Amino acid sequence: MAKFFEEPSRTFSEYLLIPGYTSEDCTPDRVSLKTPIVKFKKGEEPSLSMNIPMVSAVMQAVSGEEMACALAREGGISFIFGSQSVESQAAMVRKVKATKAGFVGSDSNISPEATLADVIALKEKTGHSTMAVTDNGEADGKLVGIITSRDYRITRMDKATKVKEFMTPFEKLIVGKEDISLSEANDLIWDHKLNQLPIVDDEQHLKAFVFRKDYESHKDNPNELLDADKRYIVGAGINTRDYETRVPALVDAGVDILCIDSSEGYSAWQANTIKWIREKYGDTVNKIAEMRV
């Protein structure tokens, strides 16, 4: 139903913007783009702010885990799209939260029983020459070795050669423990002249890599948006239908802020969603709303 406003309309030409006084302290290097993203009381520090005023749209073609890490690295927030299953969206959030600044999850993993031909195929797929050799060939497996481009020569080796025959075994690796800091990891990299440092837990399961080049990148991104555990800040989109299932899964995955993604923000459905979240989580869950036209 249309609503008519009785107040007179205004145009831009009716307003004059009067500039404030520019002192010697008003220089570009003093400009702060820090932007609060949740409500806060006057005089108090917001519980969540961005270092640059930039977020990504809650869309499948835009906001996946790669965008979330990239935007958080620059100081903004990405909202993982909600037009997917609850399990898939939670997995994306969990992957972002598993990425500490400077610590990179392994996406090039191979079994010791694989062959050189498999190594070549994996390199073509990921573009990465460093591969973790785990007992099950998965990122969370027990680390048994590493392969780099220095461990094999395609022209001099049979492509049927097993990975376990030419990998650098775990016994010869320098590794970091799960609780190591980025600074300590960098010290190990430089002290032992490494290009990468595997991070493992007490059971030798691979947790992440720290790469020499990524540490330099971390230093070049002072605006990185991190939580108290130095993990990237990430948001997620929710709808007004399956929120009773989706929200708990996202909260359990570690999401920092939720966005109600809707075509209309002024309805009972949004109010019901916010009321349910508030009753279940109080103020422990940050939430905002978005309306698409």
Image (cartoon, helix red, strand yellow):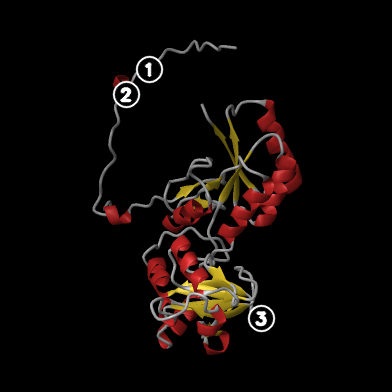
Question: In the image, is 16 to the left or to the right of 170?
Answer: left
The residue singled out by tag 3 in the image is 202
Which structural element holds mark 2? loop
Tell me the kind of residue under disc 3: Asp
Badge 2 vs badge 1, beta-carbon distance below 8 Å:
yes
Residue 205 position, x and y percent, is 64, 76
Badge 3 vs badge 1, beta-carbon distance below 8 Å:
no
Tell me the kind of residue under disc 2: Tyr
How far apart are the two marked residues, 2 and 1, measured between alpha carbons?
Answer: 9 Å
State the mark number for residue 26: none
How far apart are the two marked residues, 3 and 2, measured between alpha carbons?
Answer: 66 Å
Tell me the kind of residue under disc 1: Arg
Residue at 59% in and 59% down: 95
Q: Earlier in the sequence, mark 3 or mark 1?
A: 1
Quadrant for residue 214, please give it.
bottom left
Q: Nearer the viewer, mark 3 or mark 1?
A: 3
Question: In the image, is 124 to the left or to the right of 278?
Answer: left
In terms of depth relative to the viewer, which is nearer, 118 or 201?
A: 118
Residue at 74% in and 44% down: 245
The residue singled out by tag 1 in the image is 10
Quadrant for residue 194, please give it.
bottom left
Q: Earlier in the sequence, mark 3 or mark 2?
A: 2
Badge 3 vs badge 2, beta-carbon distance below 8 Å:
no
Residue 256 position, x and y percent, is 60, 52
Which structural element holds mark 3? loop
- Mark 1 surroundings: few (<14), some (14-19) or many (≥20) residues within 10 A: few
The residue singled out by tag 2 in the image is 15
**Residue 179 visible, this angle:** no
Please tell me whether residue 220 is drawn above or below residue 187 in the rendered image: above
Residue at 56% in and 11% down: 2
Report the number of discs.
3
Residue 57 position, x and y percent, is 49, 40
